[in-house]
Amino acid sequence: MKFKLDFTVDKSHIDFTYHYSAIFIGSCFSDEIGQHFLKNGFHAEINPFGTLFHPKAIANVLKASIEESRNVSVYQRDDLFFSWDTASKIYAFSEAELIQKILETRQKLRAQLLKSRLLVITFGTAWQYALSETNQVVGNCHKAPQNLFSKALTPVDEMHAQWQPLIAQLKTLNPTLEIVFTVSPVRHIKDGIVENNRSKSRLIELAHALVGDHQLNYFPSYEILIDVLRDYRFYQSDLVHPSDEAVNYVWKSFAEFSMHPSTLECMNQRSRLLAVLNHTSLHPGSKADIEGKTKAKKELELFKGKYPEVGWE
């Protein structure tokens, strides 16, 4: 008896290695997979403007960084200053300090885009919150009064029109950049179950339209959770966010999708060495324990010499 659908993610042509660096931007699923990159010794930049969910909000920070824009929309709440383009983790205690922080982050992201091999973009929701006065889609509402915003489900063609020229800008800036789109499997249940599914369907349509237009890459993280794992035991207790087991499953699939086979072997060898070094012996200080740790340390030094590009911090 079969208990789940068979589904194999086709390998991409990216062949990512430890010599490259990656950027992850978008919803909290970008944070999850990006952290796995860091834990496994890769070089990665993860959501420099904080977690962003809407395609327009993600596009806004990328475009501003590429164009080195000096325009920053500021919102003050009590003694805190925020930008409408970023998440609430980006804040300051004066407008000048916030603007400086945003400009420096844009400059850093642009530099990363110039040298990175991989850009992973995770769309989270198609429900937009726009400032009523300007119609600007915000990255975060920063607990501002609700009457400042209008909420709407963004049409696919509207998001597509914004992303089309942005992808051209990204490829002009760095012709070797591999762009991967994915849709977050995290349910935005506060919008409602039906509303969440309407939102996700638009994001999937948008991602596939962009991939088809520009010969980019699509990774099915949403489909793996919804159609393959397909069980609430693969979610946390809130029944919204994927469990650690689910994230690990998706991470393994993404590694096989994006990495060169020799890189996968190198990554696994690194993990084995760290497991031995971090193992808590039943008899610490014993001859067997000392010999095992000594052997592992020697193997680690040899590994570092052979693969200096692999990170260890």
Image (tube, helix red, strand yellow):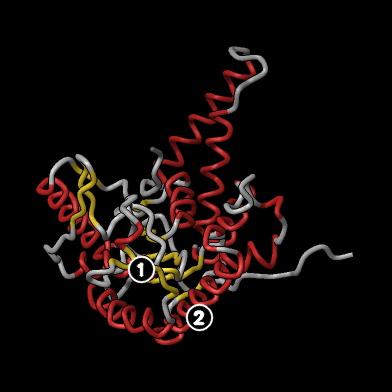
Q: Position of residue 135 (x, y in %)?
A: 27, 72
Residue under pointer 2? 205
Q: Residue sitting at 23 percent across and 73 percent down?
A: 173
Quadrant that contains the N terminus: bottom right
Quadrant that contains the C terminus: top left
| Crowd class of label 2 (few under 14; some 14 to 19; many from 20; radius 10 Å) | some
Give SS at disc 2.
helix
Disc 2 residue type (three-letter): Glu
Give SS at disc 1.
strand
Q: Is residue 202 above or below residue 44?
A: below
Q: Residue sitting at 59 percent across and 27 percent down?
A: 279
| Crowd class of label 1 (few under 14; some 14 to 19; many from 20; radius 10 Å) | some
- Judged left or right of residue 270, residue 104 is left
Residue under pointer 1? 150
Disc 1 residue type (three-letter): Ser
Number of the label disc, if any, that sits on residue 16: none
